[in-house]
């Protein structure tokens, strides 16, 4: 309670600091070459991206948005500096609730950062949807953070999977790690997440795909299967236009079966672009477990029919 009161009192000052920070970042880093190509973890909702994000940021010496920085500081460069000074070297647990982590130094999706420029209710974007000054600010702030920490920055915000064209225009040659999970497992997990959040069959869950306005009229498992297909096809299409050396597909099933081996492959992929990347010797992956959700018999039959309808059978 005390922390919330303090934050409320200091927020106007931090907001002013954040605006100064943007101007300084644009001035100092807007025209400087990126220190490293930023890394984006993308995929469909409930694909296992959060636990992968947690493991990757535990295993490798990288910088990433933390809950501490995002929730407390409109001034993101300052917030990141304080966060990593306070929690440097801390290993975070493999716990989350539908993509949200809780502890201060755990990795965050960084929604506050992106919503400064990207619309809240439209997730699929192309480069023409964002003005050039906004692109410049995003580029400059990310470049400033990487220079400040002398480390590559890793992001996990699944909306970014529907904004690949924008990211390409801003960063030119970022790296992408695409987490792929069985469509049936993804949709079962999305169904459970909707139920846990007391959403109706007609309510939309998570990332809005390119054809959201058409698909939102569907309901239940039909809507979820159509949503998954639209999101997945868009990611595949957009990644198909990017140099293969900049894209790595990661199987969620393989990651859960042998996280150490999967992360070794990820490490080798990144080292091809960033030779100085350091492995964290404190890393442990013993706690990683694969969650599996089941539907009742009637729902499972319905799911199988929709998987066939949308060509998602394995």
Image (cartoon, grey):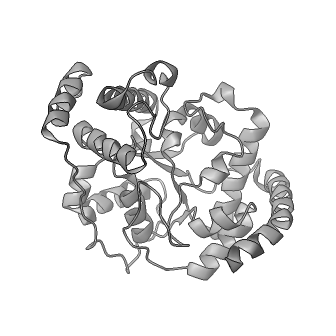
Query: In screen coordinates, is 44 left or right of 118?
Result: left
Residue 268 image point, x, y percent? 35, 58
| Quarter occupied by the N terminus | bottom right
Q: Tell which of 191 and 291 is nearer to you.
A: 191
Q: Tell which of 141 and 156 is nearer to you.
A: 156
Residue 28, above or below 216: below
The quarter of the picture where residue 285 lies is bottom left
Q: Tell which of 178 and 219 is nearer to you.
A: 219
Residue 298, above or below 212: below
| Quarter occupied by the C terminus | top left
| Residue 184 seen in this snapshot | yes
Residue placed at 32% from the left, 41% from the top? Answer: 191
The quarter of the picture where residue 233 lies is top left
Residue 25 image point, x, y percent? 79, 56
> Could you tell me how many numbered marks the image carries?
0
Query: In screen coordinates, is 29 left or right of 119?
Result: right
Residue placed at 41% from the left, 64% from the top? Answer: 54
| Residue 248 seen in this snapshot | no
Residue 162 image point, x, y percent? 50, 34
Residue 215 image point, x, y percent? 43, 22
Residue placed at 50% from the left, 64% from the top? Answer: 107
Q: Tell which of 193 and 261 is nearer to you.
A: 193
Residue placed at 75% from the left, 73% from the top? Answer: 5
The quarter of the picture where residue 270 lies is bottom left
């Amino acid at each position: 309670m005390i922390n919330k009161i303090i934050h409320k009192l200091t927020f106007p000052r931090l907001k002013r600091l954040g605006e100064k920070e943007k101007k300084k970042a644009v001035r100092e880093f807007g025209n400087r070459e990126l220190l490293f190509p930023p890394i984006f973890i993308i995929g469909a909702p409930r694909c296992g991206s959060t636990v992968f994000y947690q493991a990757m940021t535990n295993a490798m010496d990288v910088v990433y948005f933390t809950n501490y920085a995002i929730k407390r500081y409109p001034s993101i460069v300052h917030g990141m500096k304080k966060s990593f000074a306070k929690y440097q070297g801390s290993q975070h647990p493999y716990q989350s609730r539908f993509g949200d982590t809780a502890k201060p130094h755990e990795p965050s999706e960084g929604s506050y950062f992106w919503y400064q420029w990207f619309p809240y209710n439209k997730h699929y974007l192309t480069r023409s949807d964002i003005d050039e000054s906004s692109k410049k600010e995003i580029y400059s702030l990310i470049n400033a953070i990487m220079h400040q920490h002398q480390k590559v920055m890793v992001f996990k915000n699944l909306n970014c999977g529907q904004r690949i064209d924008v990211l390409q225009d801003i960063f030119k040659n970022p790296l992408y790690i695409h987490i792929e999970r069985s469509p049936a497992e993804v949709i079962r997990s999305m169904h459970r997440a909707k139920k846990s959040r007391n959403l109706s069959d007609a309510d939309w869950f998570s990332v809005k795909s390119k054809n959201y306005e058409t698909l939102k009229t569907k309901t239940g498992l039909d809507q979820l299967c159509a949503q998954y297909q639209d999101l997945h096809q868009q990611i595949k299409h957009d990644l198909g236009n990017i140099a293969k050396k900049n894209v790595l597909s990661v199987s969620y099933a393989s990651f859960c079966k042998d996280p150490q081996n999967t992360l070794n492959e990820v490490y080798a992929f990144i080292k091809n672009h960033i030779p100085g990347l350091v492995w964290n010797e404190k890393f442990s992956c013993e706690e990683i477990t694969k969650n599996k959700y089941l539907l009742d018999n009637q729902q499972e039959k319905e799911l199988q029919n929709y998987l066939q309808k949308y060509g998602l059978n394995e």
